[in-house]
Amino acid sequence: MSKLNKTSPELSLSVDFAVKDDRLPRWRIRRWVIRALKVAHTDDQISFKRMQLGIKIVGLAEGRKLNAAYRQKDYATNVLTFEYGVMPDGTASGDMVLCLPVLVKEAREQHKSMLAHAAHLTLHGTLHALGYDHLKPREAKHMEALETAILAELGITDPYLLP
């Protein structure tokens, strides 16, 4: 585990590549997760001391299989997140699955760079793993505000703005 800073949570991150892409190295994914943790840690909505997160980068077949198994949707989605909550010791934990072919296709269709879209989906999934959601309008507004603030720090345009 590595300390982010004196007031930031510790991070234990595992990244598994079922599909490899040189544009998406572990260090870059880690950087995005750390940004999300720093912002979430200062938000009053959630309290945690450390984060254990597993991320798996998959292809279409595995993405479709997982989406069917867990969401009863017969297609591969861009990101699936599994939130396991915050343990009594303050450890938040979760898993995330990023479907690389879907991510690349969406980025192309939305006229975004692959890395900008990957950053957004990684931040989005990390926030979900911490318990954030967007089912209700107020929750969605709050989560989107956090995402756009983090992306702005990274020099990435607000993904929720219509072209």
Image (cartoon, rainbow, N blue to C red):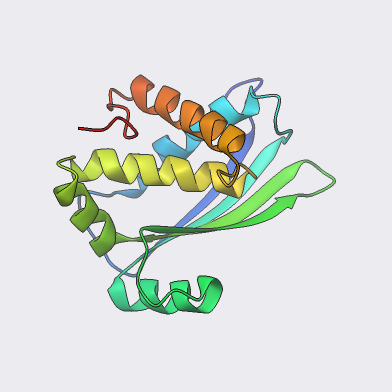
Which sits in the foreground, 3 or 49?
A: 49
Instruction: Identify the image quadrant of residue 133.
Output: top right
Instruction: Identify the image quadrant of residue 112.
Output: top left
| Number of numbered discs | 0
**Looking at the image, can residue 1 be seen?**
no
Residue beneath the point at 32% across and 28% down: 158
In the figure, is residue 115 to the left or right of 97? Answer: left
In the figure, is residue 64 to the left or right of 22? Answer: right
Residue beneath the point at 32% across and 79% down: 61
Image quadrant holding the N terminus, namely: top right
Please state the horizontal and vertical placement of residue 122, each as a whole percent of the image: 41, 45
Is residue 8 positioned above or below 75 on the image? Answer: above
Is residue 5 positioned above or below 26 on the image? Answer: above
Please state the horizontal and vertical placement of residue 18, each as a whole percent of the image: 34, 70
Please state the horizontal and vertical placement of residue 84, each as a whole percent of the image: 69, 57
Residue beneath the point at 65% across and 20% down: 6
Which sits in the foreground, 110 or 101?
A: 110
Residue beneath the point at 65% across and 45% down: 131
Please state the horizontal and vertical placement of residue 130, each as a whole percent of the image: 63, 44
